[in-house]
Amino acid sequence: MYRSVTLRVIREGVLDEIRKDESRISELLRTITIGFQGEQVFLDGEDVSEAIRENRVSREVSFISSLKPVREKLRDLQQQMGRKRGIVMDGRDIGTVIFPDAELKIFLVANAAERAKRRHAELLLKAGGATVPSVEELEEEIKQRDCDDEQRTHAPLKRHPDAVLLDTSNMTIDEQVNFVYDLVNKIVGQPGR
């Protein structure tokens, strides 16, 4: 969702204006719509599932997500979605701000070098021959984004005290899925669930 807002800001060419006057984001938030259908993300009715993963969005999402009006608007939308229960959400403040009482909170991490390798492989797959940033460049961007998100004023990135830490640095996808699956089964298997 934060990536969708960031993409809209970039497309409208108002990023520099918002950097100078954060209140400008409120105008954009009044007219934005974000929706989901399966794994697809829709911004104002357009499928932006691929566009929100572009590197230009990745570079700016920390700034946009640090803005109080953005956090408030998306918090309300996310909590509205969560009222239906039985959902899975990911985000850097889902377990601490959006759903601090969630039945299961997983703080998923991996070291920056591994995340950069994974991101590089993903970008190469989608690039179709286009140039992509180096692993080293991506690693620096990831470290900077983490630092920015940990230090932001509104809803900083941090682990909730009862969140399960899952370091995926040296795990396969199957190992990660099995770990989470086992945690979910423990909760589902409890009386009254």
Image: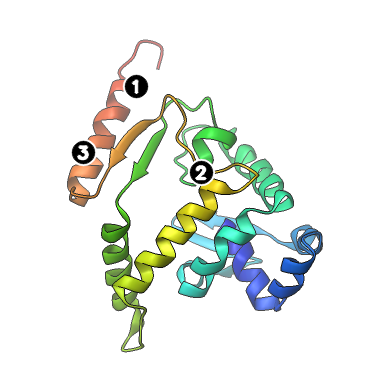
Q: Measured along the vertical axis of the image, is residue 172 above or below residue 96?
A: below
Q: Classify mark 1: residues with Cα within 10 Å, few (<14), some (14-19) or many (20+).
A: few
Callout 2, which amino acid? Leu
Q: Is label 2 in a helix, a strand or a loop?
A: loop
Work out which quarter of the rendered image holds the C terminus and state it: top left
Q: Residues within 10 Å of mark 3 (few under 14, many from 20)?
A: few
Say which mark, if any, is on residue 157. Answer: 2
> What residue occupies the far top of the structure in this picture?
191
Res 42 → quadrant: bottom right
Q: Nearer the viewer, residue 177 or 146?
A: 146
Q: Which mark is residue 187?
A: 1
Please state which amino acid type lies under the numbered disc 3: Asn
Closer to the N terminus: mark 2 or mark 3? 2
Q: Position of residue 1 (x, y in %)?
A: 57, 55
Disc with the residue nearer the chain's start (2 vs 1) = 2
Marking on residue 29: none
Q: Find residue 178 and name its label.
A: 3
Decide: is 23 above or below 172: below
Instruction: Please say if 82 is above or below 23.
Output: above
At mark 1, the secondary structure is helix
How far across and down, in percent of the image, does residue 132 sit? 36, 81
**Nearer to me, 71 or 46:** 71
Q: Measured from the top left, where is residue 112 in percent x and y? A: 32, 57
| Residue 84 appears in the figure | no
* Residue 170 in the image, given as x and y percentages of width and height: 18, 49
Q: Classify residue 125 by image quadrant.
A: bottom left
Question: Which element is circle 3 on?
Answer: helix
Of the image marks 1 and 3, the number of the one nearer the N terminus? 3
Residue located 44% across and 25% down the image: 161
